[in-house]
Amino acid sequence: MKEVAVIGAGASGLTAIKCCLDEGLVPTCFERTSDIGGLWNYTDDIRDDQACVMKSTVINTSKEMMCYSDFPIPEEFPMYMHNKYVKRYFQMYADNFKLAKYIQLHTEVLSIKQAEDFDSNGQWIITTRDKKTKNEVTKTFDAVLVCTGHHASTNKPDFPGLSKFKGKVLHSHDYKTPHDYLDQRVVIIGIGNSGGDAAVELSHVTSQVFLSTRRGSWVLNRIGPNGLPVDMAFSSRLMTSMLKIIPMSILESMARSQVNKRFDHAAYSLQPEHSFFSQHPMVNDELPNRIASGSVRIKTDIKCFTENGVEFTDGTKENNIDAVILATGYVFGFPFIDKSVIDVQDNRIELFKYMFPPNLKKSTIAIVGCVQPIGALMPISELQCRLATRVFKGDVVLPSRDEMWADIRGKEEMMRRRYVKSKRHTIQVDWIPFMDELATLNGCKPDLKLLLRHDPQLAMKCMFGPCTPYQFRLEGPGKWSGARNAIFTQFDRTMSCLKTRPLGFEPKKSRGILLFFLVVLLAVMYKLFF
C-alpha cells in the first residue's frame, strides 16, 4: 500500500487525508500547530507564517456552496458561518471519517526531496521536526500532497517614510480584535476582504478610519435576490453558459447595474477604472453604511508617511495617525521543497491545474488549494485531492508534458488579458469551469445529457440551480448515494437556520429571482436573434 505524506491539516489537508483513505492509500499528515483547521483555527496568539482569521470573521461563501461533497453542513448552522462554525464543521468532518489518528500535530516539515531513484519509483524523502522535543525524523514516502495554502508569509510593502512613522504599524495578519484602538485614528492600506473587514470593525470604536486603495474595488454583499445567498443565486451552470455567449460589453453593463443598485460605487469613491470582471471583488455587507456615516473615508494610494501622519497621492494629508494596518496580502511559497521541483516567483507558479509540476517523470507530488476562486475553495481542494490520489495510484494518467505546458500557458494568457496586473491575480480560476476541468480528468463530471434522459428532474436542478459540490458525487469514481437527495434538499438546509419564529400564517412566495433570470434570458435571446 502506497504511503502518502499530507502537509497541513487545514481545509485542504483534511480532505486530502480522507481522499487517500477512499483510494486505499495510507496517509500521514504533518501539522505544525496544535490543532486542525489552518486559517480557520482562530487563536489570540500571533504566529509567524501561520495565517489566522480575525476573531469576528464570517466566511464569504454560503454553507451549501463550501461544504465537502459527501458531508453536508448541518441545517442548524448559519447560512454564512462565523469562523467558530467553520472550525466546528472541520472537526465534525474529521471525527466522522476518523481522520485524527493520521495527523501528527506539532510537527514541522523541514524538507521534501526527491529520492535518488525518483525517476523509477517517484518516491520522496521528507524530514520533519517535532516542535516540542526538537527531534528530527527522515522518512520515505511514495507521494506527497502539499496543503499549506497561500495565506502564510505576509507581503509588507516599504512605503516612503514608513520607517520614521512613530505610531503602531502591523499587517492585517496580526490584527485580531478592535479593543486596542478605541478613539484612535487608523489608516488601513489595501481594499481586499481583510482590509474591508478591518475597516468596518474598527470604525465602530475608532475616531476615524481611512481606507487607502490604489484602484478602488467593486463590492458584493452576501445576500442576493429574495434573501438567498448570492453565490447560490448566481453560481449555476446556466449562468456559466450565459457568460460564454453573452458579449462582454453586455455582461459588464449588467454586472455594474446590479452592484450599483445597492449603492453607487462612484459616489462612494470606490469605483475602479477597470472592468467588473478584471479584479477579485470584495465581499462586504457593511462598508457602504460605514462610509455613509463618515466613520470610514476612502482615500487614494499612499505617497509617503511622516512621523505622525500620512500624505496621499492626491495631495491630501492626515495628521495625528495612531496606527497603520497593512492589508496588503500574502506572498506564497514552499520553502521546504527544492526549487528545482517547484519554484514560485513573484506569486507566479507553473503547475498543471495549479497542482502538478509538468516536468517531473513521476507525478507523485501535488499542490492543493493554491488557487484563488471566485467562490468557495473547499470543493476545489477536494476535487484536486480526488484527482491526485487517483493519479498516484495510476488510475488516471495525466496528459503529455507538452499538453500540460500548453494548459499552463493558456491560463497565464487568460489572466493577463482579463485581470489587472497584480500579485493578487496570479492564481485566479473561475469556479465552475475549473471544477469541471478537474472532474473531467477524474471522470466524475456529471453528464447532464444522460441525466436528462434518465432523471430529468435532477438534470434541471443541476443546470438551473446552484452548482453545489454534491453534483460531483453523482457518478464516476467516488460516487455517493446521498448526492441526489443532498441536491434536492440544499435550499431546505440553507433556509432552515432562519426559521426561529413561527409566523402563524402562510406567506406569499416572491417570484423576484425567477423574474431576474427571465430578464437575463430575454437579453440573451435579443442579442442572438435581433
Image: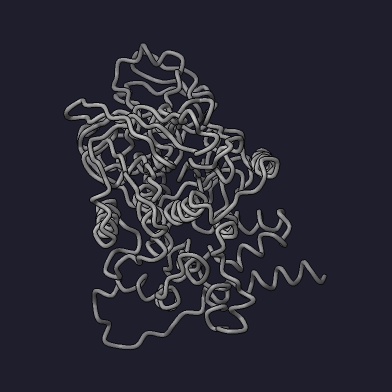
Q: How many marks?
A: 0
Name of the residue lying farthest toward the bottom: 505
> Looking at the image, which residue is at 34% across and 88% down?
506
In the picture shown, does residue 492 fall above or below 242?
below
From the viewer's side, name the closer residue of 240 and 189. Answer: 240
Q: Is residue 123 visible?
A: yes
Tell me if 134 is positioned left or right of 53 in this view.
left
Q: Quadrant of residue 520?
A: bottom right
Q: Position of residue 432 (x, y in %)?
A: 56, 59
> Looking at the image, which residue is at 27% across and 35% down?
32
Q: Position of residue 195 (x, y in %)?
A: 40, 38
Q: Position of residue 92 (x, y in %)?
A: 25, 59
From the viewer's side, name the closer residue of 401 and 116. Answer: 116
Q: Quadrant of residue 502?
A: bottom left
From the viewer's side, name the closer residue of 142 and 78. Answer: 142
In the picture shown, does residue 110 fall above or below 417?
above
Please state, as top left, top right, bottom left or bottom right, where the C terminus lies in the image.
bottom right
In the picture shown, does residue 492 fall above or below 265?
below
Name of the residue lying farthest toward the top: 164
> Looking at the image, which residue is at 37% across and 19% down?
309
Q: What colouring style does the render use?
A: one colour
Name of the residue lying farthest toward the left: 133
> Looking at the image, which residue is at 24% across and 51% down?
100
Q: Position of residue 63 (x, y in %)?
A: 37, 62
Q: Is residue 257 visible?
A: no
